[in-house]
Image (spheres, rainbow, N blue to C red):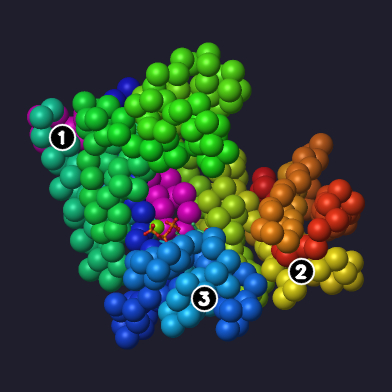
């Protein structure tokens, strides 16, 4: 079925909101994340504006490294409550443009405008993409006028192409890739521009001399399956711009337990099944909730580790109870010295909201980490998939 998909991604979101709130920051390098504490800070960068990116500062970088790169940048703590409020307003605007939308994270959403294909009365087939582009411009303008924030919009026949188009057009851009343009758009791109190809997959491909998507297309489906298992099939299709993923209405959220604990990309952006809850009579979707904490110093002290973890468990449980959620899958996140991050998960036989089960199962997972890996621990976190 022919589709028209928009991907909307706010530009340097957390930092742009901070600039909006404090116009004197405009034009200066702004870094949002953990407190750098004069270079001794422990957490990571959540995001940086484009001025700060010029110095090599980027998301998920240790805050100490960011400080080393440019100590005079404006370092700000994560004000999640504010970003969540702004995000809700933006999403309200986006949702007006189609009945079919999907919120991916605080600053990213998809819109399905395929109905325009069937809107023959209003335009002919040749004008469809022009009409979509016009709508996208209107949406950008509305967000800018109402929220004073810029975003980038990618448009394509599926989610994959729309997202990749937005990635290429950032910041404050708009890029339409029509079905006939997919080949020339994709082929010159690097393999790691293709969503789904992470650093490990990219490395394996590069060793075989595959650097560009054009070269990736020379590998057969069976060869890719041999190399990467079931994911190989997805890579084969994506390299050709094929992506049939449907829309799932989701709203993911993450919380921080103090300004040192930075929400991880994993929690905000992880793709997992969604579950629903009713808020103000409207069906909203939340897939997972969790918290994490970065220690002041890497530690092996069980009192510090389990004491902090106990607080995290209680906070996560509180969140579940307040929202009448239950859970079935528990994931414990552990980051060791050297930024080595691992997760361990446990799926229960049936869903529950029992604090004791959450406590005993998550502690068991954390204990496993402690037994298996003797390195000092930098961060612990807990995430539950909501039912
Ligand atoms: P992104 O859309 O990935 O980044 P961005 O909006 O900051 O910048 P861009 O202009 O490239 O789109 O992420 C959205 C927000 O999510 C970002 O502002 C902060 C948060 N985030 C983290 O907290 N940690 C991370 O590692 C990443 C990538 C994002
Ligand atoms: Mg963004």
Q: Which residue is mark 1?
A: 128
Secondary element at image label 1: helix
Residue placed under numbered mark 2 in the picture: 298
Q: Quadrant of ligand 2?
A: bottom left
Dot 3 corresponds to which residue?
67
What SS does tag 3 mark? helix
Q: Residue at x 22, y 41 (%)?
A: 176
Q: Closer to the camera, 36 or 112?
A: 36
Read off the magenta span.
Answer: 100-124
Q: Earlier in the sequence, mark 2 or mark 3?
A: 3
The residue under the point 36% across, 66% down is: 54
- Give the Cα distance between marks 2 and 3: 19 Å
Residue 258, quarter of the rendered image: bottom right
Res. 135 visible in picture: yes
Q: Is residue 359 magenta?
A: no
| Residue 284 in view of the camera | no
Task: Report the mark closest to the observer, 2 or 1.
Answer: 2
């Amino acid at each position: 079925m022919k589709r028209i998909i928009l991907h909307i991604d706010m530009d340097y979101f957390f930092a742009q909101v901070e600039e909006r709130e404090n116009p004197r920051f405009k034009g200066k390098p702004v870094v949002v994340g953990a407190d750098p504490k004069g270079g001794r800070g422990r957490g990571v960068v959540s995001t940086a504006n484009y001025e700060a990116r010029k110095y090599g500062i980027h998301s998920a970088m240790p805050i100490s490294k960011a400080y080393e790169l440019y100590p005079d940048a404006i370092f700000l703590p994560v004000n999640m409550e504010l970003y969540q409020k702004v995000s809700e307003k933006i999403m309200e605007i986006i949702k007006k443009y189609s009945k079919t939308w999907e919120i991916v994270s605080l600053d990213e959403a998809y819109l399905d405008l395929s109905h325009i294909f069937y809107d023959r009365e209003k335009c002919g087939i040749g004008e469809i993409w022009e009409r979509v582009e016009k709508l996208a411009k209107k949406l950008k303008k509305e967000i800018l006028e109402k929220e004073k924030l810029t975003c980038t919009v990618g448009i394509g026949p599926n989610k994959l192409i729309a997202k990749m188009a937005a990635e290429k057009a950032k910041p404050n851009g708009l890029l339409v890739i029509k079905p006939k343009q997919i080949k020339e758009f994709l082929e010159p791109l690097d393999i790691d521009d293709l969503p789904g190809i992470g650093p490990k997959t990219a490395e394996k491909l590069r060793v075989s001399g595959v650097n560009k998507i054009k070269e990736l297309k020379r590998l057969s489906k069976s060869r890719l399956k041999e190399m990467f298992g079931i994911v190989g099939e997805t890579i084969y299709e994506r390299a050709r711009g094929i992506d049939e993923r449907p829309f799932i209405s989701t709203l993911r959220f993450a919380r921080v337990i103090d300004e040192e604990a930075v929400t991880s990309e994993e929690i905000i952006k992880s793709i997992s099944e969604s579950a629903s809850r009713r808020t103000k009579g409207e069906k909203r979707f939340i897939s997972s909730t969790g918290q994490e904490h970065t220690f002041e110093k890497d530690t092996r002290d069980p009192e510090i580790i389990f004491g902090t973890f106990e607080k995290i468990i209680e906070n996560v449980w509180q969140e579940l109870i307040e929202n009448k959620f239950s859970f079935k899958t528990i994931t414990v996140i552990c980051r060791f010295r050297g930024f080595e991050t691992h997760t361990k998960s446990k799926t229960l036989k049936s869903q529950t909201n029992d604090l004791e089960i959450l406590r005993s199962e998550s502690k068991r997972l954390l204990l496993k980490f402690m037994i298996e890996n003797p390195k000092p621990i930098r961060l612990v976190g807990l995430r539950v998939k909501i039912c």
